[in-house]
Image (cartoon, rainbow, N blue to C red):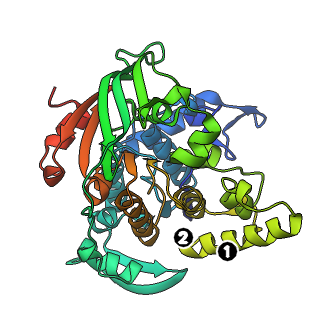
Amino acid sequence: GIGIVPQYSMLASNLTAAENVALGHEPLLAGFFYDKKKAAYDLSLLCGRYGFTLDPDVPVSFLPNAQKREAEILRALARGADVLILDEPTSILAEHETEALFALIRRLTAAGTGIVYISHRSKEILNLADRITVMRDGKVVRTLPAAGLEECDLADLIVRANACELDSSSTTRPGETALEFRNVSMKAPSGSTFDAIQDLNLVVRSGEVVGVVALGGNGLDVLEDLASGLIQPDRGAILVQGQTLSGIDPRKLRTAIMAYLPTDREYRGLCSSTTVKCNLVSKRLQNYGFTAFARGLLQDKDADRLRETFGIKGGKDQAVPTLSGGNKQRLVAARELDGYRPVVLAANPAQGLDMAARTLLFQRLRAARDAGAAVLLLTSDPEDLSDLADRSFALYRGRLFPVNNVNLHDGRLASILTGASS
């Protein structure tokens, strides 16, 4: 049979790993009662066969992302899947979790399981695949063997441009400080052995992109919450254009000062109960005149322009929940990057995007930088630093370490992110 592991987890978070794997095919006692011990035993057999380490009795909500992926894969294998379709399987994984997943995929293929690996990350495709099919706008462009291909070859097929020559260098000199963290500290939830953010000092100037990369659990999510104004630091201060962030009116911050592309686009970036048009124009409502007729015409015009510019598929009156993950990210980017704001906060902005959409988004972020915006890029993908950042830092256990953009792949960055250099 064929098993599917979707991009976003379909596990029941309140059930254990064993219960999720057995769901729909539960072992029964006397034909009526759920056999918990048999389910746990069956899971342990599967784990032993494929080299997994899942605890059958732990609720899925407590599992790290990598083990959630393992549970979904095991659920498919338990149903006799000979072919696994993996849709963007690394989109929620840290780098070390990604390597563990790759090792698992190689074990599965060695055991005779066929893998269809769907991803926009060309490096992963080249690392794993025997054959590659490139799609663009829902159509097959070409199928070819992976041997001998380079990332630029795939990029050219996908985006119809010479991706090898894409230039990330800045055409402007950094100006005045626009965003500053002064001795910022933030305690982690109880039970952690270190503060989420520790004595962090960071300056982002107009006309530059400053990138911060971290693996999961090292404070990047807390840094995003602090930079967006969602939470206040326990110690220190965050300044935007010389003014304390907490002293800025939230409406003014979001409409006139800071463009914000959140990691959680579903709940922070979008109003899912409305349409594409409503989300696109929500920060410009004051610009649309006083009569309902004039407002409707102007809103339609802006929505159509932004949909075309950012490649948002579907109609402007389409309900947001019906959009794909990539189109939701384009929708947030279109609203936030339309027009100039002096500060841009971009948190994992390329997560879930195909290569063409990622290229367009990074071009827009570079354009914002070149127009004088201060861009703070928070990411769990070191490739984002290579492609976008002018200055880069690594965040490990709440502490910030400078890294050289030229040498992102010389081992120093990996040693910082994993704590091997400390």
Task: Identify the residue shown where x is 41% and y is 33%.
Answer: 242
Instruction: Work out whether residue 208 or residue 150 is closer to the camera in this orientation and state it.
Output: 208
User: Above or below — where is 243 with respect to 173?
Assistant: above
Is 245 above or below relative to 71? above
Q: Earlier in the sequence, mark 1 or mark 2?
A: 1
Q: Could you tell me which secondary element the residue under label 2 belongs to?
A: helix
How far apart marks 1 and 2 lie (CA) works out to 10 Å
State the residue lying farthest toward the right. Answer: 292
Query: Which quadrant would the C terminus be assigned to in this image?
Result: top left
**Amino acid carrying mark 1 in the image:** Asp
Going by the image, does 252 lie left or right of 111?
right
State the residue at coordinates (53%, 32%): 229
Q: Is residue 268 visible?
A: yes
Q: Say which residue label 2 marks.
A: 310
Query: Can you tell which mark lies on residue 304?
Result: 1
Give the percent coordinates (x, y) of residue 231: 53, 26
Quarter containing the N terminus: bottom right
Residue that appears at 17% across and 37% down: 415
Indicate left or right for 123 with 159 as reference.
Answer: left
Q: Position of residue 150 (x, y in %)?
A: 23, 74
